[in-house]
Amino acid sequence: METLWSPWRSKYIGTFKDGQHQSESSCFLCDAANQVRADSESYVVARRKNCFGVLNLYPYNNGHILIAPYRHIGDFLQLTIDETSDIMSLLQESVAALRQIYGPHGFNIGANIGHGSGAGVPDHIHFHIVPRWNGDTSFISTLSDTKIVSVAIEDTWRQLSEILHKG
């Protein structure tokens, strides 16, 4: 049997305590929004007037992006028209950029709203863009709940931010 090493996952697993997710800070999305660290360190790939895009540190696939409003709100109905418009525009721009870079066969786009939906950060609404390829789910993800991401997050950040910072 082969062994696949993914030591970076231990950081994520360590953020859970007694079945509840415990983030290192109050809200990693707010930290990214408020530029607590440089965009290259927090993996922010785009900033718009009312929202921003950041790479998921624990991606389902290469290029997994989160799009969030700057405001710390958890309720979809609290988004303003301007926030909703900017989020939808950035979702479209991100899909175009991901097509250009990776050429996926499809995308999953959506949001987990509220703790009951599985939201990891239920108090700061965000939308996921997950590039998908035919056959990207294999026996390893089905049997061992393991996902292989083959591109370094730094490379993905560099490519996406070059395209999306033009917007």
Image (cartoon, rainbow, N blue to C red):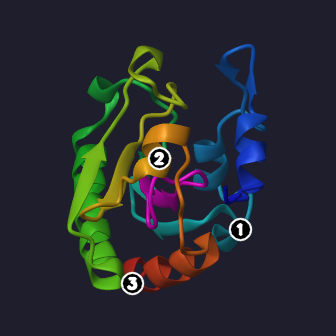
* Mark 3 Cα shell of 10 Å, populated few (<14), some (14-19), many (≥20): some
Per the image, label 1 sits on a secondary structure element best described as helix
Tell me the number on the disc at residue 163. Answer: 3
- Nearest the eye: 104 or 29: 104
Q: Which residues are magenta?
A: 53-66
Q: Is residue 59 magenta?
A: yes
Which amino acid is tagged 1?
Answer: Glu
Residue assigned mark 1: 41
For marks 1 and 2, the one nearer the N-term is 1
Mark 1 and mark 2: span between their CA atoms?
28 Å
In this view, 77 is above or below 167: above
Q: Residue 114, located in which quarter of the rendered image?
A: top left
Residue 106, horizontal then vertical, whole percent: 20, 62
Q: Is residue 152 left or right of residue 70?
A: right
Instruction: Name the kind of residue labelled 3 in the image.
Output: Ile
> Which residue is at the front of the view, 92 or 138?
138
Mark before the other along the chain sequence, 3 or 1: 1
Is 90 situated left or right of 117 in this image?
left
Question: Which residue is more in the foreground, 149 or 38?
Answer: 149
Task: Identify which residue is drawn at 63% across, 69% down.
Answer: 39
Give the answer, above or below, for where 29 lies relative to 95. Answer: above
